[in-house]
Image (cartoon, rainbow, N blue to C red):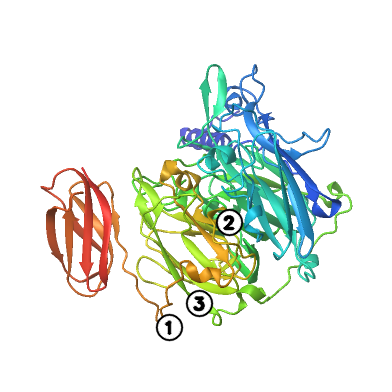
Amino acid sequence: MQKTPSPHLKFLLISFLFLLACRLYAQPNFINKLPIPPLIDAADGVIELKMEQRKHKYNPAGSGVVADSLNGTPQQNGITTFSYNKNAPGADTLTLLGPTLYWRQGQPVHIRVTNNLPAVNASGTDSTTTHWHGVELPAQFDGGPHQPIQRDSTWDVMFNVVDYGSTMWYHPHFHNRTLEQVQMGLSGMIIVEEANDVLRPLLPHTYGVDDIPVIIGDIGTVLSNNEYKLTLGMGKRPHNIVNGVNSPYVSVPRHFVRLRILNGSTRKGVQFGFSTSYNNPATNLIPFKLIATDGGYTTEAVTMTEILNGPGVREEVVIDLRDYPLGDTVYLSNLNQTMPSYVVGSPSPAPNGGTDPTHGTAFLAMVITDDSAFPGYQPINSFPDYSVAWEPDLADTVNNIVGCRHKNLVGAPGMGFTIDGTTYDMEVINDTICVNTKEIWEIENKSPIAHPFHIHKIQFRVLSITDAMGAQLNLTEMGLNGPKDDILILPGWTVRFMGNFNDYPNPIESKYGYMYHCHILTHEDHEGGGMMHQFVVAGNPECEAGSPPAACATISSTQQPIRQILLMYPNPASGAFFLRGNSAAPSQLRILDLQGREISTQVLPAFTGEHRVPTEGLPQGLFLVEWRSREGVVVGKLVLR
C-alpha cells in the first residue's frame, strides 16, 4: 500500500524546491565568451592605430528584451560605439576597446594614431587625443589635452621605454570630452616587459591563457527614436562589462592564473575578490596574491581576499586553482555590497556620493578546464616566494628631496569638485618642477566622497596614509607596496607620496604640461567641477622662475601629524549633522551664510571621533561651516534642509 506523504514532509519538499528555484533564478547565465584583445608587439614595427565609430553588442549570446537593451534593436543590429583597431586592411575586428599593446623596457616605440571618428558623433566633438596612462615619456607625446588629434589626421608618437614591467593603458584625454569618448569605448591595455625580469618565467605569463587582461567597465542604455544609445554624462550605468561584454566566462587551466585587472570605469570604484559562490561571495572568499600595482611589482607578494580601487587603477593578481575539479567555476566577484557609501558605485544610500551601483555579484566566471584545451601552454605549478627592491627611481626616500607640495581635494556633490578651489585652465601652469629632483606630495581629501588621484609622467611611492581619525594605515596590508600613479583617496585621508622627476625637461610653457587630476571623469571634466591641474618639468635655471615646493615638515616613523579634517555628514542635513575629527581642547564652530554673516556659533567640547551639531531653528539653504580649534581653522560647505 502506497503511503501518502505527511503534511510536514510536503512542506519541507515544497520549501526545498522553492529555495532551489530561487537559487537557480539568482544564478545568472555567464554566456558570453570573454574577448581577449589581440596583441600588437612594438618590436614588429610601427604600431598603427585608428579610432573609429562601430556597432557593438554587449551581450552577443543573449536574446530577448534585456539583450536588446545591450545589443540594440534588431533593426539597428548593435549599439553605436567607438573603438581602436589596427590601421591595416581587414583589421577592423574590434567594435569596442582596442588591442593590447606590448613593448619592452629599453626599446624604442613608434605609434601612429589616426582619428577616423565621424564629424557628428555622440561625444560632441570630432577631435580627440590618446593618453598613455602610467607611461613615462616626453610631455609632447603624453596625449593630454595639449595634443589634440583632429579628424582625418594622424599623430606620431616616438619614445624609448623607461618603465619597468607593468600593466598600463591608453585612452582619450580631450578636455571636457574625456568621459564621453572613454564611455563610448575608447581604451586599451598596455603590457610592459622588463629587461632581465627574473620573476617573469616564474609567474603565469601566457597571454590569454594563464595571463588574462581584465578591463572592468559599466554601461547604461536608453531607448530613443527606436534605437538604444549609451548613457553618457551623469546618467546611470547599471551593467557590468568585462573586455566589452556583459556576463562573460573564460576557460582557465587548473594551475596558477594571473589576472591583470584594470578598473576602466569612467567613474565607479570597484571592490573585487574571488569566490566559488555567486549568491554569497563575501562569505566564501578565496585568498589570492597581489604581485603588482600600477607601475610594477610589489616588493613582496601580498595575500589578500579583496581589494577596493578607483577608476584607472591596475592590479596584477595570481590565484591558485590547482585544487578545483575540472568544470568548477570560480568567480571574480563584485563586492560592491560592502563598498562604503562615499565611493561612487556603492549601493549604500547617499548623500555622500555612493549611488549608481552595478547589478550582479560577479564580473567574470572562470571555468576550470583541462590543459588539452590550451595547445602549447606551459603551466606554472608553484608560486615564487619573492622579495624585490624598489625600482631605483623610488628606492631612496631621503636624499635630493627638494620640498613638499600640498593639494586639497575639495567640493561636494551637486556643487562641483576642484583641486585647491580652482578649475582646470589649459593656459595656467599650476606647478613648475625642477628636473632631476624628488618631491613629496601630500594629497588631502576634504570632500565627502572618495577620489582616485592620478598624476601623469611618474610612478610614485606611497610613504604614508593618515585616515580621518588620525591613524596611520598599514601600506603593505592595503597592497600599496608597489609603484603607483593612481590611488583612491577616501574622505578625510591624507596620502603622502614621493615622486622622482628625473627626465624630459621643457621650457615653462603650458603646452608642455603634464596633468594631475581625479580619475572620476565627470570630476575631471568641467561637468563635475574641473578637478584637474597641470605641472611642467623644467631644466635649470629656468625652473627657478616657477613655483618651488614648500619645505617638508619632519615626519618620524613613530609619530605622524594628525591633520585636522572638516568632515560633515549627512550633507544635506536636517535637524543636526555630525562633525568627524579630533580636537584636544574646546573649539568653536560657526555657521555663516555665503555673504559671511554669522548665522550660528557654538563652543564644542574636546572630542575624538564624531560630535553631533544641532541645527534646529536655522534657515534652509547653502552655508559655510567654520571650525576653529587649537589645531587650526578649516571651512566647508553644508546644505541645510
Residue 420: which numbered mark, if any?
A: none
Q: Nearer the viewer, mark 1 or mark 2?
A: 2
The residue labelled by disc 1 is 558
Q: Amino acid at mark 2?
A: Tyr
Residue 249 occupies quadrant: top right
The residue labelled by disc 3 is 402
The residue labelled by disc 2 is 512
Name the spot of residue 125 as percent of width and height, x first. 56, 33
Q: Amino acid at mark 3?
A: Val
Query: Residue visible at 13% across and 61% down?
Result: 602
N-term mark: 3 or 1: 3
N-term mark: 1 or 2: 2
Residue 48 occupies quadrant: top right
Q: Nearer the viewer, residue 641 or 245?
A: 641
Q: Nearer the viewer, mark 3 or mark 1?
A: 3
Query: Residue visible at 17% across and 53% down?
Result: 596
Mark 2–mark 3 Cα distance, whole angstroms, equals 22 Å
Q: Is 33 situated above or below 109?
A: above
Q: Check disc 2: other Cα within 10 Å, few if <14, some if 14-19, many if 20+.
A: many
Label 3 secondary element: strand
Q: Check disc 3: other Cα within 10 Å, few if <14, some if 14-19, many if 20+.
A: some
Q: Nearer the viewer, residue 50 or 282?
A: 50
| Residue 368 appears anywhere in the view | no
Left or right, residue 410 beside residue 267: left
Name the spot of residue 239 as percent of width and height, x first. 55, 37
